[in-house]
Amino acid sequence: MASPLVSIVMGSDSDLEIMREAAKTLDEFGIAYEMDITSAHRSPARTADFARQAAARGIKVIIAGAGGAAHLAGVIAAETVLPVIGVPIPSSSLQGLDSLLATVQMPAGIPVATLAIGRAGATNAGVLAAQMLALSDREITGKLAAYKEKLARGVEEKSKKLRG
Ligand code: RP5
Protein backbone atom coordinates (compact mmCIF):
# COMPACT_ATOMS: atom_id res chain seq x y z
CA MET A 1 0.00 0.00 0.00
CA ALA A 2 1.19 3.54 -0.81
CA SER A 3 1.93 5.66 2.22
CA PRO A 4 -0.83 8.13 3.02
CA LEU A 5 -0.62 11.68 1.66
CA VAL A 6 -3.80 12.88 3.34
CA SER A 7 -4.81 12.42 6.94
CA ILE A 8 -8.52 12.50 7.73
CA VAL A 9 -9.18 13.01 11.42
CA MET A 10 -12.37 13.57 13.36
CA GLY A 11 -13.35 14.37 16.89
CA SER A 12 -15.47 11.28 17.49
CA ASP A 13 -16.68 8.09 15.85
CA SER A 14 -20.07 9.83 15.61
CA ASP A 15 -18.49 12.02 12.86
CA LEU A 16 -17.50 8.99 10.78
CA GLU A 17 -20.61 8.71 8.64
CA ILE A 18 -20.03 12.21 7.26
CA MET A 19 -16.23 12.05 7.12
CA ARG A 20 -16.44 8.85 5.04
CA GLU A 21 -17.47 11.13 2.16
CA ALA A 22 -13.99 12.69 2.20
CA ALA A 23 -12.45 9.21 2.12
CA LYS A 24 -14.72 8.09 -0.76
CA THR A 25 -13.70 11.15 -2.76
CA LEU A 26 -9.99 10.51 -2.21
CA ASP A 27 -10.62 6.89 -3.29
CA GLU A 28 -12.05 8.22 -6.56
CA PHE A 29 -8.79 10.07 -7.21
CA GLY A 30 -6.65 7.13 -6.13
CA ILE A 31 -5.07 9.17 -3.34
CA ALA A 32 -3.77 7.24 -0.32
CA TYR A 33 -5.08 8.43 3.03
CA GLU A 34 -5.29 7.44 6.67
CA MET A 35 -8.23 7.97 9.04
CA ASP A 36 -8.22 8.41 12.79
CA ILE A 37 -10.10 9.88 15.72
CA THR A 38 -8.56 12.52 17.95
CA SER A 39 -10.25 15.22 19.95
CA ALA A 40 -9.15 18.78 20.66
CA HIS A 41 -10.90 18.66 24.02
CA ARG A 42 -10.98 15.03 25.14
CA SER A 43 -7.45 14.11 24.00
CA PRO A 44 -5.54 17.38 23.56
CA ALA A 45 -2.08 15.82 23.99
CA ARG A 46 -2.82 13.12 21.39
CA THR A 47 -4.10 15.79 18.99
CA ALA A 48 -1.00 17.95 19.42
CA ASP A 49 1.31 14.93 18.92
CA PHE A 50 -0.58 13.96 15.78
CA ALA A 51 -0.30 17.48 14.32
CA ARG A 52 3.39 17.88 15.20
CA GLN A 53 4.34 14.54 13.63
CA ALA A 54 2.15 14.57 10.51
CA ALA A 55 4.56 16.35 8.12
CA ALA A 56 7.52 14.15 9.11
CA ARG A 57 5.37 11.07 8.38
CA GLY A 58 4.86 12.26 4.81
CA ILE A 59 1.37 13.68 5.17
CA LYS A 60 0.76 16.64 2.81
CA VAL A 61 -2.78 17.73 3.70
CA ILE A 62 -4.89 17.28 6.83
CA ILE A 63 -8.69 17.13 6.76
CA ALA A 64 -10.26 17.61 10.18
CA GLY A 65 -13.97 17.22 10.94
CA ALA A 66 -15.57 18.07 14.26
CA GLY A 67 -18.89 19.20 15.64
CA GLY A 68 -20.15 21.52 18.36
CA ALA A 69 -17.34 23.65 19.82
CA ALA A 70 -15.32 22.42 16.86
CA HIS A 71 -11.72 23.34 17.66
CA LEU A 72 -10.04 20.27 16.17
CA ALA A 73 -8.99 21.77 12.82
CA GLY A 74 -7.80 25.00 14.47
CA VAL A 75 -5.76 23.26 17.14
CA ILE A 76 -4.13 21.06 14.48
CA ALA A 77 -3.41 24.11 12.30
CA ALA A 78 -1.69 25.72 15.29
CA GLU A 79 0.76 22.81 15.52
CA THR A 80 1.70 22.22 11.86
CA VAL A 81 2.66 24.08 8.69
CA LEU A 82 0.65 21.64 6.56
CA PRO A 83 -2.57 22.96 5.00
CA VAL A 84 -5.57 22.09 7.16
CA ILE A 85 -9.07 21.70 5.73
CA GLY A 86 -11.94 21.93 8.22
CA VAL A 87 -15.29 20.16 7.92
CA PRO A 88 -18.00 21.41 10.30
CA ILE A 89 -20.11 18.46 11.48
CA PRO A 90 -23.82 19.03 12.25
CA SER A 91 -23.70 16.96 15.43
CA SER A 92 -25.32 19.30 17.94
CA SER A 93 -28.75 20.85 18.44
CA LEU A 94 -27.47 23.92 16.52
CA GLN A 95 -27.25 21.82 13.33
CA GLY A 96 -23.64 22.66 12.59
CA LEU A 97 -23.79 26.44 12.67
CA ASP A 98 -21.78 26.25 15.89
CA SER A 99 -19.24 23.92 14.24
CA LEU A 100 -18.98 26.19 11.20
CA LEU A 101 -18.27 29.31 13.24
CA ALA A 102 -15.86 27.53 15.58
CA THR A 103 -13.93 26.13 12.62
CA VAL A 104 -13.91 29.16 10.34
CA GLN A 105 -13.21 32.02 12.75
CA MET A 106 -9.47 31.53 13.06
CA PRO A 107 -7.14 34.36 14.05
CA ALA A 108 -4.83 35.88 11.41
CA GLY A 109 -1.82 33.68 10.81
CA ILE A 110 -3.44 30.28 11.50
CA PRO A 111 -5.77 29.50 8.57
CA VAL A 112 -8.21 26.63 8.35
CA ALA A 113 -9.77 26.17 4.89
CA THR A 114 -13.31 25.75 6.15
CA LEU A 115 -15.86 24.06 3.91
CA ALA A 116 -19.62 23.57 3.98
CA ILE A 117 -21.40 21.95 6.92
CA GLY A 118 -21.86 18.19 6.59
CA ARG A 119 -21.64 15.82 3.62
CA ALA A 120 -20.98 18.44 0.93
CA GLY A 121 -18.15 19.83 3.02
CA ALA A 122 -16.65 16.38 3.52
CA THR A 123 -16.85 15.61 -0.21
CA ASN A 124 -15.32 18.98 -1.03
CA ALA A 125 -12.56 18.39 1.51
CA GLY A 126 -11.54 15.39 -0.56
CA VAL A 127 -11.70 17.41 -3.79
CA LEU A 128 -9.75 20.34 -2.30
CA ALA A 129 -7.07 18.02 -0.93
CA ALA A 130 -6.78 16.49 -4.42
CA GLN A 131 -6.47 20.00 -5.92
CA MET A 132 -3.66 20.83 -3.51
CA LEU A 133 -1.82 17.61 -4.35
CA ALA A 134 -2.44 18.19 -8.07
CA LEU A 135 -0.19 21.26 -7.95
CA SER A 136 2.74 18.85 -8.12
CA ASP A 137 1.06 15.77 -9.63
CA ARG A 138 -0.15 15.77 -13.24
CA GLU A 139 -1.95 12.46 -12.88
CA ILE A 140 -4.22 13.91 -10.19
CA THR A 141 -4.72 17.02 -12.35
CA GLY A 142 -6.06 14.76 -15.13
CA LYS A 143 -8.38 12.98 -12.71
CA LEU A 144 -9.72 16.32 -11.47
CA ALA A 145 -10.48 17.40 -15.04
CA ALA A 146 -12.33 14.11 -15.63
CA TYR A 147 -14.23 14.57 -12.35
CA LYS A 148 -15.48 18.00 -13.46
CA GLU A 149 -16.51 16.60 -16.84
CA LYS A 150 -18.48 13.87 -15.06
CA LEU A 151 -20.28 16.51 -12.97
CA ALA A 152 -21.16 18.46 -16.11
CA ARG A 153 -22.42 15.29 -17.85
CA GLY A 154 -24.64 14.63 -14.83
CA VAL A 155 -26.28 18.02 -15.23
CA GLU A 156 -26.78 17.42 -18.98
CA GLU A 157 -28.49 14.10 -18.23
CA LYS A 158 -30.78 15.65 -15.62
CA SER A 159 -31.61 18.46 -18.03
CA LYS A 160 -32.46 15.99 -20.85
CA LYS A 161 -34.64 13.96 -18.49
CA LEU A 162 -36.55 17.04 -17.31
CA ARG A 163 -37.06 18.42 -20.82
CA GLY A 164 -38.00 15.00 -22.27
C1 RP5 B 1 -17.15 16.71 18.88
O1 RP5 B 1 -18.28 16.48 19.64
C2 RP5 B 1 -17.09 15.61 17.89
O2 RP5 B 1 -16.42 16.01 16.74
C3 RP5 B 1 -18.53 15.29 17.63
O3 RP5 B 1 -19.01 15.94 16.46
C4 RP5 B 1 -19.25 15.86 18.85
C5 RP5 B 1 -19.99 14.82 19.65
O4 RP5 B 1 -19.13 13.78 20.00
P1 RP5 B 1 -19.68 12.46 20.71
O5 RP5 B 1 -20.29 12.92 22.01
O6 RP5 B 1 -20.70 11.86 19.76
O7 RP5 B 1 -18.50 11.56 20.91
O8 RP5 B 1 -15.99 16.77 19.64
Image (cartoon, grey):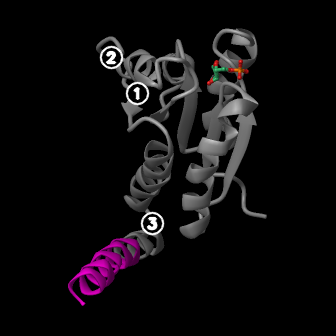
Spot occupied by residue 80 in the image (x, y as percentages of width and height): 53, 25
Spot occupied by residue 96 in the image (x, y as percentages of width and height): 46, 25
- Label 3, secondary structure: give it: loop
Three-letter amino acid code of the residue under disc 2:
Gly
- Label 1, secondary structure: give it: loop
Front residue of 110/124: it is: 124
| Residue located beneath label 1 in the image | 112
Which image quadrant: the C terminus? bottom left
Kindly identify the residue that appears in the image at 74 percent across and 36 percent down.
36
Kindly identify the residue that appears in the image at 53 percent across and 17 percent down.
93
Calculate the distance from the C-alpha at mark 3 to the C-alpha at mark 2.
Answer: 27 Å
Kindly identify the residue that appears in the image at 75 percent across and 17 percent down.
46
The reply to whether residue 132 is visible in this rendering is yes
> Viewer-nearest of labels 2 and 1?
1
Asked if disc 3 and disc 1 are in contact, CB closer than 8 Å, the reply is: no
Instruction: Specify start and end residues of the magenta stretch as a single range.
Output: 146-164
Residue 161, magenta (yes or no) = yes
Calculate the distance from the C-alpha at mark 3 to the C-alpha at mark 1.
Answer: 23 Å
Q: Pointer 1: residues within 10 angstroms few (<14), some, or many (20+)?
A: many
Three-letter amino acid code of the residue under disc 3:
Asp
Does label 3 or label 2 sit earlier along the sequence? 2
> In the drawing, what numbered circle is on residue 137?
3
Does label 3 or label 1 sit earlier along the sequence? 1
Secondary structure predominantly adopted by residues drawn in magenta: helix
| Residue located beneath label 2 in the image | 109
Quarter of the displayed picture in which ligand 1 can be seen: top right
Locate residue 115: give its quadrant: top left
Farthest residue, direction bottom: 164
Asked if disc 2 and disc 1 are in contact, CB closer than 8 Å, the reply is: no
Front residue of 103/117: it is: 117
**Residue 124 placement, left or right of 10:** left
